[in-house]
Image: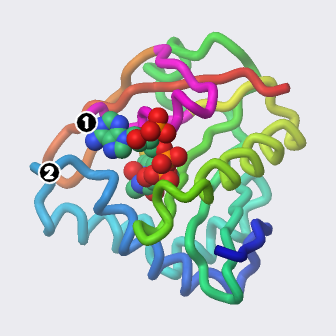
Amino acid sequence: MSHTIRKATADDAGPLAELAAVTFPLACPPSSSPADIAAHLANTLSEKHFQRYLADPETTVLVIDADGRLNGYSLLVNRAAADPDVLSALTLQPSVELSKCYVHPDYHGLGAAAELMHASLRAAAAAGGAAAWLGVNSQNARAIRFYEKSGFRKVGTKSFQLGSTVEHDFVLERALP
Ligand SMILES: CC(C)(COP(=O)(O)OP(=O)(O)OC[C@H]1O[C@@H](n2cnc3c(N)ncnc32)[C@H](O)[C@@H]1OP(=O)(O)O)[C@@H](O)C(=O)NCCC(=O)NCCS
C-alpha cells in the first residue's frame, strides 16, 4: 500500500466517521449488541463529533491516507485523565491518551498500524508527554498483542460503558522517548 500519515483536517471529518463505522465494531466483544454499537457510533463517532475533535486544540487526529482514501486513524488527547481508575493506574506523568487507534481491516497485518503507532507516539512526545496511555477491551486479543509489540504494558483496569453493558478495559502505558 502506498500511503502517507498526516494530520487530519476539517475536510476529513466525513471520511473519518465512515472509517469509524467500519472499524469501531471490530474492537467490541462478540457479545456487544448491534444497537449498542450503533448508539456509540451516533453518540461519539459521527461526522459532527469528528468536526469537534478536529477543532479541539488538545486533540490530535492522524490519518493513513492512501491516495485520498483513509485507511486508518489515531486520536490523541493531551489532557489529564479524568477517570480515577486510570489516574491511580498510571505510573508516569504527563501522559497523553491514545484514545483511538483503528486501521481498516483490509490493511491489518501489513505494517500500516505500526507506522500509525510510531507517528502517534512521536506526536504524543512532541505534545510534551512523558508517556502515552490507552484503554483496550480485555477481550480484544489482537489489539492487546499489537500494543504490547508497540511497547505498552498493562498497568490497571477501567470500566467502559457500551449501551447498558459495562465493559472491562485494560489500561496500558508506555514511556515516550
Ligand atoms: C489494533 C490494530 C490497529 C492492529 O493493527 P494490525 O495490523 O492488526 O496489527 P499487527 O498485525 O501488526 O499485530 C497484531 C498482532 O496480533 C496477533 N493476533 C491476531 N489475532 C490475534 C488473536 N485473536 N489473539 C492474539 N493475537 C492475535 C497477530 O498475529 C499480530 O502479532 P504478531 O505480529 O506477533 O504475529 C488493528 O487490528 C485494528 O484496527 N483492529 C480493529 C480496531 C481495534 O481493535 N482497535 C483498537 C481499539 S483499542
The residue located at (18%, 61%) in the rendering is 36
Which amino acid type is shown beneath numbered disc 2?
Answer: Pro
Front residue of this view, candidates 56 and 138? 138
Q: Quadrant of residue 90?
A: top right
In this rendering, the answer to whether 17 lies above or below 141 is below
Span shown in magenta: 134-155
The residue located at (19%, 54%) in the rendering is 163
Cβ atoms at labels 2 and 1 below 8 Å apart: yes
In this rendering, the answer to whether 78 lies above or below 104 is above
Percent from the top left, x then y, of residue 39?
25, 68
Q: How many labels does the image show?
A: 2
Q: Quadrant of residue 87?
A: top right
Quadrant of the frame with the C terminus: top right
Packing grade of label 1 (10 A; few <14, some 14-19, many >=20) is: some
Percent from the top left, x then y, of residue 141?
32, 36
Q: Mark 2 points at which residue?
A: 30
